[in-house]
Image: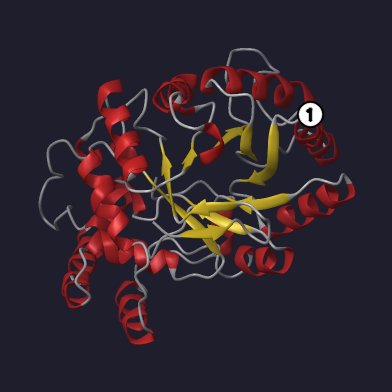
Amino acid sequence: MEFRHLGRSGLVISELVYGNWITHGGQVEEDAAVACVNAALDAGITTFDTADVYAQGAAEEVLGRALKDQRRDGLEIFTKVYWPMGPGKNDRGLSAKHIKESIDNSLRRLQTDRVELYQAHRWDVETPLEETMQAFADVVHSGKAHYIGVSEWTADQIRAGAELAKELKIQLVSSQPQYSALWRVIEAEVVPASEELGIGQIVWSPLAGGILSGKYKPGQAAPAGSRGADPKFGRFVEGWMNDDVLERVQQLGPIAEEQGLTIAQLSLAWVLQNSNVSAAIIGATRPEQVQENVKAVGVKLDDEVLEKINKLLEPVAVTDPKETTAPNPRA
């Protein structure tokens, strides 16, 4: 495993972060989830990302049980707040009430007294930003989180949040957007703003929900047991399931082979070439997937290889920065 600073902060995290969206408490049984966490630990991954809304708290609980016997000071645990966690009108959003109640609930489920990073899971149009940032400052100053971050905020929203964070003497260190060789909407605006502010990207879906693994073949049904074949979770990849995209992904095969990599490893390495990316989040339903993904760590792709990948995928890649706040048509 290799490690990077999270933005310009002093916090060092593993280049690959183990994330449990969809999988823990949902797609796989707990024994399999724990086996994947153990595989991540064995591979040197020290950073784990979750959110309260994943399986309505169950994902945090599973992760908490899986990590409870580990040395806490050797881990970096991230979670998030925003999405509805109950039927009440205040069981959602980024109000002071919801943030302060949610951090306590997350810590209880994770069986820890603090998280390294607490993230706003989306922008809240109904709560003044000043209220949100003050609540995050209270969380940090109380010792329940060390740093704060955001997820899927626009460049302008990140700038506004960073300005208030500085006034409140807390560190906004990260942005968690979707990013892959197929979904590149952060490159035009979010990345330049983040570089200026010292904010690092912790990117999710670096394999476009598994599309960039190469396992989905044009003209064929999704493989049994894959996300694309799952009646509940297939909607997260169905937008990519067209022959034009899948044929181009298959054409990454020879490029990957030249580098001694699989298509998935090549795609992860592509994401990690972006200097503003502090880490890429990987998920898994089997330990073998973790073991394969970590082989992308430390790989350096030269400019010629990057150009080949970009030229091949450019006709089907999404690059419009406005998609940062729009519903993802691919998920």
Q: Picture coordinates of residue 256 (x, y %)?
A: 21, 71
Question: Residue 235, how many percent across, how many down?
Answer: 33, 39
Q: Residue furthest right?
A: 167
Quadrant in which residue 186 is drawn: bottom right
Along the viewing direction, whichever of 184 and 2 lies nearer the viewer: 2
Secondary-structure class at tag 1 = loop
**Quarter that holds the N terminus:** bottom left
Find residue 312 and report its image quarter.
bottom left
Residue that sits furthest to the bottom in the current view: 304
What residue is drawn where x is 18% and y is 53%?
216
Q: Determine if residue 75 is in view.
A: no
Residue shown at 70%/29% (left/top)? 144
Name the residue that disc number 1 marks: 142
The location of residue 113, given as percent across then percent down, is: 63, 24
Residue 48 position (above or below residue 165): above
Look at the image and tell me whether residue 304 can be seen.
yes
Q: Is residue 282 left or right of residue 274?
A: left
Picture quadrant of residue 323: bottom right
